[in-house]
Image (tube, rainbow, N blue to C red):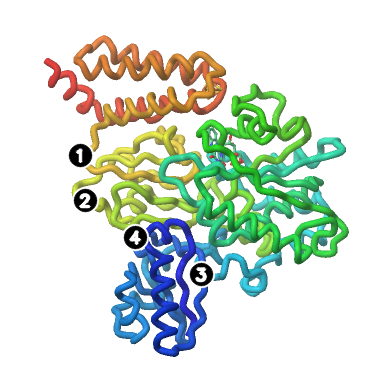
Amino acid sequence: MKIYVPMDSAAKALGADDVAAAIIAEAASRGLEIELIRNGTRGMIWLEPLVEIDRGAGRVGYGPVLPADVPALLDGTLKGLGRVEQIPFFARQTRLTFARCGVTDPLNLDDYQAHGGLAGLRRAAGLSSTEIVEEVTQSGLRGRGGAGFPTGIKWNTVRQAEADQKYIVCNADEGDSGTFADRVIMEGDPFCLIEGMAIAGLGVGATKGYIYLRSEYPDAIRVMQEAVRIARANGVLGADVLGAGRAFDMEIRVGAGAYVCGEETSLLNSLEGKRGVVRAKPPLPALQGFLGKPTVVNNVISLATVPVILEKGAQHYADFGLGRSRGTIPVQIAGNVKHGGLFETAFGMPLGELVLDIAGGTASGRPVKAVQVGGPLGAYMPLERFDTPFGYEEFDGAGGLIGHAGMVVFDDSADMLQMARFAMEFCAVESCGKCTPCRIGAVRGVETIDRIAAGDPGAIPLLTDLCETMTDGSLCALGGFTPYPVMSALTHFPEDFATAKEAAE
Ligand SMILES: Cc1cc2nc3c(=O)[nH]c(=O)nc-3n(C[C@H](O)[C@H](O)[C@H](O)COP(=O)(O)O)c2cc1C
Ligand code: SF4
């Protein structure tokens, strides 16, 4: 009998380690022979710890399981959830990037290969660098870190650059509120990221890679370090990648977790041991990045999606999606929701379906008021925009952004003036300080919103004006996009700003 208990840190936070220990102890006391596998999460966080048992006829789920449930679990009398793949939240997904996550043992390279792992890298090893980059370009993959920039174009710039050394830098800073896809894949399928980085290395001619991982993710750091060690020991990394005669190796670097260090140039400074301050562009990191050398900086999900593209072909990936948003996106559902977790779907699903149907509405049972999509710099989407399909251009047209595809749901008790204030405060705290509209503008923004709250009607046009200045004059998206949450709160929920004024009167 195989028993799966996730080792994902969200599952652990909900008691997975205690459940695993209880299973081992109970099985030992009964003389029962079991194989306990610590898998990644399936992404259904509200069911964690989600234990799966395979008695020979597929994996049946139980969750959330408490240590006290373990005797009944082993007796077979605990009420189950049925086959895990048939749980509606899971069954409705299109799992390409996360196909193995929660299925395999994250640190077992044989298990990885048995589930399609390394097929992409094997294929890439037989292709020229131009062919690899062309495949990624044809897939339509766009950066999942926030900006949605076409990955193939970025790679091609680095591929064509002349240099004695090039680098692949993986952005695993994952600072956006409500996001956890990077962490889930690093803890649940680390070889997939390693494989994606190795393919990127072969594609652009880089022999060295770094994962910039935040210190707040100790489990991901441990799993990635171990996975790199195993990959190196098995010839996936090193002087002769899979015997193809080309070199690629990598290491994990731990960042201290400043939000701005997720911005690619600030990240490069931090990686070089400098203060995490944003660099002006140009030069682009693709031409002068880490240590001044041509560098691909890609998000974890962008890179972890490359293996399936090489394995199944660009067209297979491009066949999913909507408009210029090709393939799938791991939507991360958080905040006040019934069913929080990771939902990988082809682009195109309307926002309302994700919030009200997939996520099941609010956990509080109160009506949904707003959803912030795309992290702390994303707009608050009101119910009137719930028909917006998940797509880069479609969200842009609706005054929002997808960013890293985190969604934080709020019920009708949320005070949107306070949310706008928080956005400005966040920007003030996290600003790297390099440019004035952000460094000083965010502080003035908090003060101006306080004036609105105190009933000063003249402060509303001032806030609008300030937001325009921040949008137009900031060097990076921290200052430049903070107006998204602020102005969307003001535009869609004017009553919260008026109520504050009336209350003051
Ligand atoms: C303030 C700020 C924070 C950012 N944080 C992250 C982050 O945590 N992870 C990430 O992948 N990209 C982040 N980005 C985007 C990166 O600058 C960059 O666009 C991305 O790493 C490129 O990779 P991609 O093309 O694969 O998305 C951030 C940008 C800004 C302005
Ligand atoms: S916008 Fe803010 S974070 Fe970005 S460079 Fe300017 S001061 Fe730094």
* Eye-nearest disc, 4 or 3: 3
Please report contact status of discs 1 and 2: CB closer than 8 Å, yes or no: yes
Q: Which residue is mark 1?
A: 413
In the image, is residue 143 above or below residue 458?
below
Please rate how many residues cluster around mark 4, counting C-alpha atoms within 10 Å: few if below 14, some from 14 to 19, many from 20: some
Work out whether mark 1 precedes mark 2 in sequence or the reverse, and give the earlier one: 2
Disc on the earlier residue, 4 or 3: 3
Label 2 neighbour load within 10 Å: few <14, some 14-19, many 20+: few
Within the image, what quadrant is residue 31 found in?
A: bottom left
Indicate the amino acid at tag 4.
Trp
Residue drawn at x 59%, y 45% as measured from the top left:
213
Q: Are marks 2 and 4 in contact (CB under 8 Å)?
A: no
Give the amino acid type for the residue marked by disc 1 in the picture.
Answer: Ser
* Residue hosting label 2: 364
Q: Which residue is mark 3?
A: 38
**119 versus 194 height, above or below:** below
Nearest to viewer (mark 1 / mark 4): 4
